[in-house]
Structures are given as C-alpha cells and as structure tokens.
Amino acid sequence: MLATSSLGVGQLVLTFSTTRTYRQNPTSVNFRGTGTSSTARVSVFLSDGNGTYGCGPSVTYFPPSIFCPLGATAYVAAGDINLDGVRDDFSYFEVRSVTAAVAIEPSRLDLCKLYSAPPSTFPRNFGFLDNTIVVYYNIQTESIKEYKLTSYLNAINYGTRGEMDAAVVPGLYTFVFPRLRTPEVAVQIPVMYHHIPEGSIKKNHVRTGFRFTKLNGAALRWSTDGFVEMDSRVINTFEWEGNTQDVIFPSSDVLYFAVLDLGNAAVPVRGNPERDAPAGLNTLFPGFLAPGTSRVILPNALETKFALPPGMVPVPPFGKEGAVEVTLVRSMVSSSVATDAAQRFYQMPVRFVNTYAGWAAVSFPPGTSAAMRAPTADPDGDGFNNQREYLAGTNPMLKSSHPAPPVLAFVQGRATRSTATATAGYWETKMAKAEVSPPVTYEYEFSTDMANWNVIGDADPNWLVDNSSAEEIKVRSKNAQLSGTGFLRVKMTQAPEPPPMELE
Ligand SMILES: [Ca+2]
Ligand SMILES: [Ca+2]
C-alpha cells in the first residue's frame, strides 16, 4: 500500500529536468546527441535536508582565516555535499548551517522507484543512485551532530532525437520514496512535465517547433557550406518562431540570446557548421565576461526577435564563425516539492563577413546621401567607384586613397654554376584579393588591342596564372623577353547573394 505524506517542507525538493540542444541547417533542425558535446538528458533529483557551505572540500582540517571565517566546521563522510558532481567523501568543509532531512529515509535505493509515467518507452525500472550525504557538524565543539541528508538521483542520456522523443514525453510522472524512520511507508511525489518547444520538425505535413526564420526581415540565406552570413557593422535582427502561447509559460520561462564562438579566431578553420563550440571561449555576444558563456535575458519568453546592435561583435577578422543561440530555461513548480526544470538550446551557425553594406556603414560620414553611398558612385572623384574602393579597402571619401596602380615587374632569374638549376627571369604582376561576401572571383585577361580580351587559361603559351592563394592572384610571363604590344587586366566577378531558403 502506498501512503502519501503531507509534504510541504521547502527543503524537500524533487526536480525533473530535461535538456536538449538543436542546431539548424538549411534543410532541417538537428538534434545534438551522439557525436556532439551537447547534453541530451533527462534527470531526476531528490534531496531532503540541506546545508549552506563556504570553503571546502579539504582533505585536512583548516582553522578560521580571512577567507574561511568559520574554518572547517564539518566533516563529510559520504556524498556530494556541494552538488558539483564529485563525491566529497572524507573531506572537511566550512558549513554554516545544516538542516536535517524531514521526510525521506536516506540510503534505501530498494524503496525508490518510478510509480507511474505517461505511455512511452521511459524505463519503468528507472532506478536511482544514492547520494546520501553523511556529515558531522560542529566538529570544533564537543557536541558534534551526525546528519544524514537524503539525496537520490539518476540521469539518462540520449543519442538520438527518436529515442528521446519516444522515452520522455510530457505528462505526469510519479516517483515513490521511503518515508523517514518508517521506510516501509511509501511517499509519492508526482511531477508534471509540460510541453516545451522542441526543434522544428515536420510531422503529418505540419511543421511545429522552434526555428529561426529571418535575418533583417528576409528569409534566411545560407552560404554553400551552411552558414548564415552577416556583417556585424550593421544591425542584425534575428527572428524565430515556435515559442508560442500554448507551449510557453511566461511566469516560469525565461528566454536568453547569445552568439557562441565556434573557435576560429587565430587561424581560420572554416566550415563544418555542426562543430562544437570549444569549451572555455568567451561568447562573441555578449562578450562582457571572460571566460565562458554569457547571455542576454529577453524581456519575456514569448519574444520572437532580437536585434544585435552594430559593433557588438568586433571585426576584423572577417570569417569568424559562431552560433546564434536562443536558450529557453524553465523552472515550473508543479507542487510545493516538485519542479519541472527544462533547458532548450536552439542554435544556428553564423559567419561574420565583410559586406558592402557593412563597409558602407562605417566608411561614409553621417549625412552622406544614398546616391553617394551607391557602389557605382565616386564621391571623392579619384576615378575609382565605391565598389572598387570597398574591394581594395581604401577610403571612398579621400581622393588620395584609392587602389594602387598595378606594376609589371621583372623578377631576376637565378644563375648558378650548374646550368641545370639556372632559371631565366620573368615578368610578374599581382593583385590582392578582397575577403568579402558574396565572394569575388579573379581572372587575368590579356588583349593585344584593348578591345578583344581573352581569359588567360592553363594552356596559355605566354602567361602563367597562379590563383591558388586566398590573398592574391599573380600572373607571370613564361619568357624573360616580352614582345609586341599587350595589355593585362583583372576581371573581378562578385557572386550573387545566395537564394533565401525556407524549411519545407
Ligand atoms: Ca572614389
Ligand atoms: Ca578614394
């Protein structure tokens, strides 16, 4: 027979928590389980009795000091007293106060179990681990008291969305625990696990759940390697959907916004939008605290947009990759004892790039007309339009600042004693490439009359193009002697914006 004790004591706590992370790509929203550093987990934690702690753990007794004013007041014989996931057996702590367990018998794993759960594959034999904390308190006195603070916990990690969807479904979960001092009496503790937005998914032709929908008012545009690109010198407004009234509880749900650093600051390691954010890196936004993750709290959990102000993610370097992350944190009390605690991380890979709009935002003084800001305009009259100045990184408002004229220079050959390694000289010119988005491709063209131009290809008899570097393109003559009349020019072609994409 099960009896339900009257429970209303603040120190008795049961937490049913679920954690999931999703990362969006051009065609779907991926669950991050196997193969990622993200956590996909359900955990149940019960504790009865607690304490307030200062310094510790220490393997030896420590007296009062400036940093630990009470000194070691307690000896922990068993358990994880500071709940950091590491057992503190046989260690000294500075404990300020201890509150004894009042409801649940410690260390009776045989009497802790799942009583009922909604229809699902949730394991009916869900067991617990014993984390009972045995603590001797007031060890500096002659009246040392032994406390046994009850604590049971268990967690299950999931590798795939299918497994977790099937096992952990919203509904009422009831657990039973042994009553303190009369452990044969079972104490029932129910907890309601509520619906919460999961990563967007299409079921029966209907798409539901959380997904990012827009950047700066337009459907998302994805680079060919799977990033949403933006220039941090302009306002970037992200929009999303799925955190709707039917699955959000504004009184207990909190929404946060951040941009994680995917870690390619020093050496560009581009690509792989599914990669983990390296541990210990500062967030790209907000980047006020170091190290680790910080985030901005949104006005309420029903918010569906966030405007990232210009300049909050510093440039250069361009090409920096990160992940926009909206986090939903729920702490919903379902009784005086039980809490539905959930965390959902919704991510989207982004790359900070050099766009014309971003360059223009910082390159013209306030009040410059739209006509003067246009790519084809030449407000400083130096003969190079704004687009050329943008690609060269020169000042569009300063006549003396403009792309440098090309130089065709002779590179001396090498004469050595062995004629086999001697090389003839050659003529060479080069042009720096711009790192911009959309990307620009560069080609050298040759003409004898300035009217008919031909791209210099691999089989050209006279010229050799080296286009292998990301920084510059070079062309050199195959012979030391040039003959006849000829002209070289660089053809720059900027790719179109990628098309906007909607998840089907
Ligand atoms: Ca100009
Ligand atoms: Ca200029």
Image (cartoon, rainbow, N blue to C red):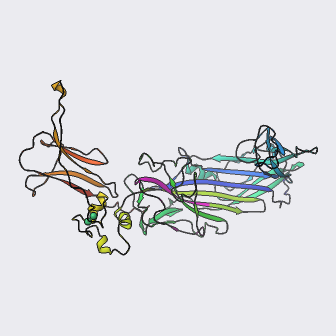
Up/down of 292 relative to 211, above or below: above
**Quadrant field for ligand 2:** bottom left
Q: Residue furthest front?
A: 400
Q: Which residues fall within the magenta stretch?
A: 299-328
Of 138 and 161, which appears nearest the observer?
138
- Residue located at (37% from left, 53% from top): 224
The residue at the point 70 percent across, 55 percent down is 16
Residues 411 and 22: in front is 411
Percent x, y of residue 33: 55, 48
In the rendered image, residue 481, in percent from the top left (x then y), is placed at 10, 40
Residue 483 part of the magenta segment: no
Q: Which residue reaches farthest left?
A: 484
Quadrant location of the C terminus in the rendered image: bottom left
Left or right side of 399 for 226: right
Residue at figure coordinates x 30%, y 65% from the top left: 396
Q: Is residue 211 above or below residue 87?
A: below
443 vs 58: above or below? below
| Closer to the camera in the image, 450 or 384 | 384
On whether residue 310 falls in the magenta region, the answer is yes
